[in-house]
Image (cartoon, coloured by chain):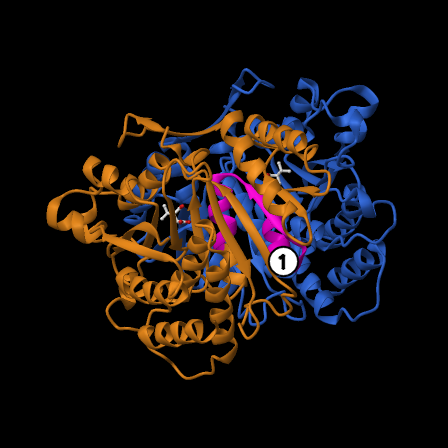
Chain colours: A blue, B orange
Amino acid sequence: MVDTVKLAVIPGDGIGPEVVTEALKALTAATEGAEVVFEQTAFSLGAARYLETGDVLTDDDLESIKGHDAILLGAVGGVPGDPRLAGANIERGLLLRLRFELDHYVNLRPSVLYPGVASPLAAPGDVDFVVVREGTEGPYVGNGGAIRVGTPAEVANEVSVNTAYGVERVVRYAFAAASARPRKKLTLVHKTNVLVFAGSLWKRTVDAVAAEFPEVAVDYLHVDAATIFLVTDPARFDVIVTDNLFGDILTDLAGAISGGIGLAASGNINPDGRFPSMFEPVHGSAPDIAGKGIADPTAAILSVALLLDHLGRADAARRVQRAVVADIADRGTARRTTSEVGDAIAARISALD
Amino acid sequence: MVDTVKLAVIPGDGIGPEVVTEALKALTAATEGAEVVFEQTAFSLGAARYLETGDVLTDDDLESIKGHDAILLGAVGGVPGDPRLAGANIERGLLLRLRFELDHYVNLRPSVLYPGVASPLAAPGDVDFVVVREGTEGPYVGNGGAIRVGTPAEVANEVSVNTAYGVERVVRYAFAAASARPRKKLTLVHKTNVLVFAGSLWKRTVDAVAAEFPEVAVDYLHVDAATIFLVTDPARFDVIVTDNLFGDILTDLAGAISGGIGLAASGNINPDGRFPSMFEPVHGSAPDIAGKGIADPTAAILSVALLLDHLGRADAARRVQRAVVADIADRGTARRTTSEVGDAIAARISALD
Ligand SMILES: CC(C)[C@H](C(=O)O)[C@@H](O)C(=O)O
Ligand SMILES: CC(C)[C@H](C(=O)O)[C@@H](O)C(=O)O
């Protein structure tokens, strides 16, 4: 019996379409001969669509996306400072709206320093951790407001909303992830000494769930201290669980120390399976290098590995990852185009059977 | 005429008293022969005081501190996890209360990679920037709350409060600081694409104040991207202006890349002069190494340089800094005790006249 997976593809803006093309080559190579067919629907979403139609994400788009099993996204966002985009917030209206509407409460961001990759750190050590970033709460909820805007008496507030419901489910996911890894270590990152209400909820929740996972060693770091360890001893980390904003900050830093966000993949996951999960490189649309064929598609390809894993295709996922690792290890100083990298990795995947 | 400066000294906990002792030696050496006398009052505040009396910071303490011209603080905070401290939040009740009550709206944190200092970065370049962190607003205001605590229906909120009044004054200070530096560059760091209300206020304020400082080049980075540049190209920064929480995170990272927070000094400044400003090393009380005489007093000594600068004693400040730089450049691998370092720097200061 052949499985059919309905895949929504959002190439997006800038280098998004270029890297997605390569990611799809990897997907095809990895699932060739497997009893699975990916039925792809492309969605034209992002700054380009907005400029053409004035729409960021319509309810129809959303309904149609919900009918899919998974989403592959390249990158969205126009040229910074483009006056025609001043009124739109593509990030909030599209990327964050998808994460919230599709209840992507786990934002999974692995950081691995692959052999052959240069780190800006002099002695990075053996970097191999994953950040489990909460995706549907915290300061990202859009629950702020402002009064007297534009006057000297303006007040602009942002509200971070944290619920036992939302914190517990992501913490439980993080413990399960830690338990499945060899080192079985979980670090909660927050700022409990200042954000006392949210911090207390996170801390109590970790303590409570820890009792169900006695095999997992738990520690805690303030977010400021965590950034120090990320540059002085990143090898100490195994699984980090943290809120939406801290996770945003830590994962960019984590990407940088493990060879740049050109290599960083991510999954926006709805573990319940009620909604399709979405896989995307951590990098943005990089309009400055778009259309030149020089974008690195590796992060998008590694996002395909996360997608395959999520769909229960662990073997295919591992082949994508092994092919990427092999390709990286052989990268010399010669510059390759985006499609040369994609073709090389796809060829390696096919050769791996 | 001899000036009298009333100095409140808060040695605090852990290594705080040890490093303050050395900082005071530097202060004495730097102002010897100058027409100034430092009249010191020691305040017993911190975890130790709390354990003894149950007080964190009484109104009387606060009034008495307000009667001083400046404050030198070592570090406060007990042993992490000490059950007797579970009810107290020394950070909020003491450190943050002082910053808020004394209207320390500028938290000044220079990052300089001194010659001879090892950075965890392979190629740090010429690191010399200063973070102007807002000190009285943002997510630090303590304006959160929680309902149904301890139940599965708990909601815990944190509110970031930002006002035109508060943002404009710190932004103006940052522009003035940038204007006085050779490179005249200012980078706003925020997360305007997600925290749209607060972000918009910060962005509009920087744009407005920029018109008064045409000589200052301005750019903007999202906080996540800023952490990337701090490890890939920290030399790009000159003055960073940012909110209370982002400033907390960035300055720990900045300290780490410029040789560790053992070297990071800070000033909590009330530029109006209505209240005494407070100078402190960025590091904490480090109870694990307290009492062993091995703490590095350099950050506390550099905080004295910031204090002298603030009091209009630029010459004395420069001598402290030059002595520290010279001491650092000569540091071999031999371990010195806290007081050996302090004595050596004090001797260098005296020799510099
Ligand atoms: C584009 C932006 C809204 C987004 C975020 O802040 O989550 C990005 O930085 C990320 O990390 O995926
Ligand atoms: C101790 C803590 C409250 C404080 C802060 O968050 O401001 C510290 O991290 C700092 O940076 O001075």
Picture quadrant where residue B291 is located: bottom left
| Most distant residue in the front direction | B1
Picture quadrant where residue A180 is located: bottom left
Horizontal and vertical percent position of residue A68: 66, 31
Q: Is mark 1 within 8 Å of ligand 2?
A: no
Vertical relation: B221 (above or below) B44? above
User: Observer-nearest residue: B45 or B78?
Assistant: B45
Vertical relation: A163 (above or below) A20? above
Indicate left or right for A112 with A34 as reference.
left
Vertical relation: B52 (above or below) A162? below
Under circle 1, the secondary element is helix
| Most distant residue in the top direction | A148
User: Observer-nearest residue: B308 or B182?
Assistant: B308
User: Observer-nearest residue: A232 or A127?
Assistant: A232
Q: Reply yes or no: does residue B103 show up in magenta.
A: no
| Other residues around mark 1 within 10 Å, as few (<14) / some (14–19) / many (≥20) | many
In the image, the segment drawn in magenta is B226-252
Chain at numbered mark 1: B
Residue of label 1: B234
| Most distant residue in the right direction | A292
Which residue shows up at 36% across the image and 42% down it? B276
Amino acid type, label 1: Pro
Indicate left or right for B116 with B280 as reference.
right
Horizontal and vertical percent position of residue A289: 82, 48
Horizontal and vertical percent position of residue B284: 35, 57
Horizontal and vertical percent position of residue B249: 48, 48
Can the viewer see residue A273 in this picture? no
SS assignment for the magenta stretch, majority: helix
Can the viewer see residue A51 in this picture? yes
Q: Reply yes or no: does residue B244 show up in magenta.
A: yes
Q: How many marks?
A: 1
